[in-house]
Structure formats: C-alpha cells, structure tokens
Image: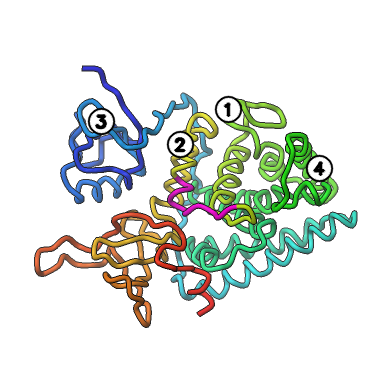
C-alpha cells in the first residue's frame, strides 16, 4: 500500500487519523515507531507534549480536511548552536508593569521615527537601542507578559504597532532558539525597523485604506532599499538587523523580492523576519479587513512551509508561539470560553487561561484564571478540563481590548 502523508498541526488532529511520523525522532517518546491510530483526546494531548506537528497517512486513516504539504528537510544545520536555555524568572503579573512600560517606550519611538525620517533627520542608533533593550529584558524575564499585554490592546494604528509587535516577535523567536542576548537585541531592532523605508515613500502609497494599482505595488517594493539607506545613515550596523531589513520579503521558493533569493541563499535573519512580518500582518486589523486569529495565522504560515518559508524555521516558530498562542481565544471541553494567558512549556496544550464565559456563555464576574496543567483529574471520572478548539476574535462579542480597559 502506498504511503501518502500529510503534515498537520497536533491541535488539528482528529480521532481515526493514523500518525505515521513525528516532527522529531520516535526515541524518547512513548509512541510506537511503526505509527498508530489516534483513538482518544488523550492521544492528542500526549502528542502535544512532544510535538508541534505530525505526519498522517491518509490511506491508513482519516484524511485531514485541509491537507498540509510534507516538509522538505535541510541536510545542513539551519540554526546556530544554542548558547542558553532561557526560562521565565519572574511571574506574569509581576512582569506586566515593566512590559507595559517597555511597550509604551517603543510605541512612542515608532511615532517619533516616522516624523524624523520624513523630515530628513537621522535616526539615532542610541535612541533605538535604549528603547529596544528594555523590551528584550522583559521578554527574557517572562516570555508571556508582553504578548499578553499586546493581545489586550487595540490595534488601531497598524504601522506603529506592527513595528513594536515585529520587534517583540523577533526577539521572542530568538529567545526560543537560545541565541545570545546581543543577537536578540539585533533581532528586536530589525523587527522594529522592518518597514522604516515606508516612511520615505509618498503617503498615498503607504496609506492602508487606499486602493493601489499594480504599479503602486511595485513602487512599494522600494521601501526595502529606502530602509537600508536609513539604517546605514543611522550608524546601526548589526549584521542580523541589516539582513532582516534587506531580506524580509524574500521567499524560500525564490518568488520574493528584491533579489529573488531562494533557500539557504536567504540569511537566517531574513527568513525569521519574513515569518514574523507575515504573521503579525495576518493577525492585525486594517481599514480594509479584520485580522485573523493567532491560531488561524499560524495555520496560514504552516501552509506556506517549504514554498514561502523554510519548513524548519516554520516548525520552530510554531513551537515558539505554541498551538494556542498567548492571547488566543479558546473554548474548553466544559463549554467555557477563555483567553490564553501564558504557556506551559512542559505541556503545550495545557496553558494558563483566563476563563471569561461559563458553559452557557454568560460572563463570569470576576473572571478567573486557571492553570490547565495543574488541574487534577475529576473525582466523577469525567475528562479533565482542556482546550477543544480556537475561536475567532470577536466570538460571543468578546473583545480583548475591552477586557484590558475594563
């Protein structure tokens, strides 16, 4: 019988599917190396403790409703050696005030830089570093606090928030890859300045509410060269930062710009930047459309594996954010609705959540948070509380920004 495999996120598995391969070696897992059928929710939960994604044989078992391409594997190392395994050293609530301050500083600088560049003033490398470093320090102390805060904020000024969010995402990804702190600062700087070249272009081109012609789209590509020019004049000379600005629109299959580079010809920083830039653009509201859920954006990124983005980099990005990223709206098997507050690295399908609605979809007052990993088995023998699926933003009228402002 021919083996026909499809790649699928663990969170999308269904009973009856046949798992033929993991995204890691079988060794060190409790699963039979010859593969197995998914028979229960517990099988899915157990897989989530070891994998982000798996391969399913569509001949031996139920086929996924949306087939995902099998990833190709690089024969050479994709990432630098890990130099440190970062762990959270400060609780979420304790870090949140510092994360809020770091976010505000970076957001203010984003607005200031646009004015400076349009006025022909040089970007100060010192001001950028002094704004970026507190955010990196906050992420090192607690990887969830900043993203919890970001998910609670209104996203009505896309250009500025996109810069801040890409900065945070790039640094968090670097933290996940255990890169040195100085590299994290460079990644955060690159994420922050990805679209600084847009400020040089005519406003009519970059207005998100405007209708652009094909020629306008081509002219917008000039923001890459313009951004590099701004970077050079600023004195910011980090190699990771420059590679991010130069290559964040290159794509794995060579369909990107400005150089049409493909595969390993794209520096790792550029590959990271391309995913970070795309992910935040997908989840962001714009005048012409509403942003996707975090879970939906991750699926879109995954569908681009080994076409738009290198598969190994996508895998690590998914592991960095987890199946249900911080800030995701989710429904529990109890029928309750919650928002993900923080990740449990040991069990990625059992994060800490804030429960907002009861099983009848009535709001709790006050809301309460629950660590799904810490819950004991129910005395009545029922299934332990767990996430069943992700919800779209706005489901049941829930707006995280209103929760934050309440």
Where on the picture, by quarter, is residue 89? bottom left
Q: Is residue 310 left or right of residue 237?
A: left
N-terminal of the two: label 4 or label 3? 3
N-terminal of the two: label 3 or label 1? 3
| Identity of the residue drawn at 56% across and 42% down | 275
N-terminal of the two: label 1 or label 2? 1
Residue at mark 4 to residue at mark 2: CA–CA distance: 31 Å
N-terminal of the two: label 2 or label 3? 3
Q: Kindly identify which residue carries mark 2.
A: 303
Q: Which residues are magenta?
A: 289-298
Residue at mark 4 to residue at mark 3: CA–CA distance: 48 Å
Where on the picture, by quarter, is residue 244? top right
Q: Kindly identify which residue carries mark 3.
A: 20
Image mark for residue 226: 4
Vertical placement of residue 30 versus 76, above or below: below
Neighbours of disc 2 within 10 Å: few (<14), some (14-19), many (20+): many
In-front residue for pair 389/315: 389
- Name the residue at the bottom extreme: 365
Q: Kindly identify which residue carries mark 1.
A: 264
| Identity of the residue drawn at 49% across and 41% down | 301
Q: Between tags 1 and 2, which lies in front?
A: 2
Q: Secondary structure at mark 1?
A: helix
| Identity of the residue drawn at 46% across and 35% down | 312
Task: Tell me the quarter of the image containing the N terminus.
Answer: top left
């Amino acid at each position: 019988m021919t083996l026909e495999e499809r790649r699928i996120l663990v969170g999308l598995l269904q009973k009856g599917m046949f798992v033929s391969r993991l995204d890691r070696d079988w060794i060190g897992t409790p699963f039979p190396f010859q593969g197995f059928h998914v028979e229960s929710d517990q099988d899915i939960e157990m897989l989530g403790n070891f994998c982000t994604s798996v391969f399913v044989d569509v001949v031996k078992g139920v086929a996924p409703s949306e087939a995902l391409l099998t990833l190709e594997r690089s024969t050479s190392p994709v990432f630098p050696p890990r130099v440190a395994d970062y762990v959270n050293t400060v609780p979420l609530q304790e870090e949140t005030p510092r994360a809020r301050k770091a976010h505000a500083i970076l957001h203010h600088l984003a607005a200031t830089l646009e004015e400076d560049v349009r006025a022909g003033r040089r970007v100060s490398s010192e001001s950028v570093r002094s704004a970026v470093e507190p955010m990196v320090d906050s992420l090192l102390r607690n990887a969830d606090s900043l993203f919890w805060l970001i998910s609670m904020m209104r996203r009505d000024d896309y250009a500025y928030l996109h810069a801040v969010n890409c900065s945070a995402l790039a640094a968090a990804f670097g933290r996940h890859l255990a890169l040195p702190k100085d590299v994290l600062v460079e990644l955060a700087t690159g994420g922050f300045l990805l679209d600084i070249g847009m400020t040089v272009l005519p406003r009519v081109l970059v207005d998100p509410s405007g209708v652009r012609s094909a020629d306008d789209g081509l002219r917008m590509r000039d923001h890459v060269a313009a951004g590099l020019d701004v970077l050079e004049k600023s004195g910011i000379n980090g190699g990771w930062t420059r590679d991010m600005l130069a290559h964040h629109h290159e794509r794995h299959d060579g369909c990107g710009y400005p150089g049409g580079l493909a595969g390993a010809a794209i520096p790792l920083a550029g590959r990271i930047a391309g995913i970070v830039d795309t992910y935040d653009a997908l989840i962001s509201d714009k005048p012409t459309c509403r942003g996707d859920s975090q879970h939906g954006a991750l699926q879109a990124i995954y569908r681009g594996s080994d076409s738009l983005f290198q598969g190994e980099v996508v895998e690590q990005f998914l592991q960095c954010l987890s199946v249900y990223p911080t800030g995701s709206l989710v429904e529990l098997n109890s029928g309750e609705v919650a928002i993900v507050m923080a990740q449990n690295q040991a069990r990625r399908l059992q994060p800490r959540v804030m429960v907002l609605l009861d099983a009848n979809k009535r709001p709790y007052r006050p809301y309460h948070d629950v660590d799904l990993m810490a819950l004991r088995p129910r005395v009545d023998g029922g299934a332990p509380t767990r996430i069943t699926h992700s919800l779209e933003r706005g489901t049941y009228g829930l707006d995280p920004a209103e929760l934050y402002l309440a």
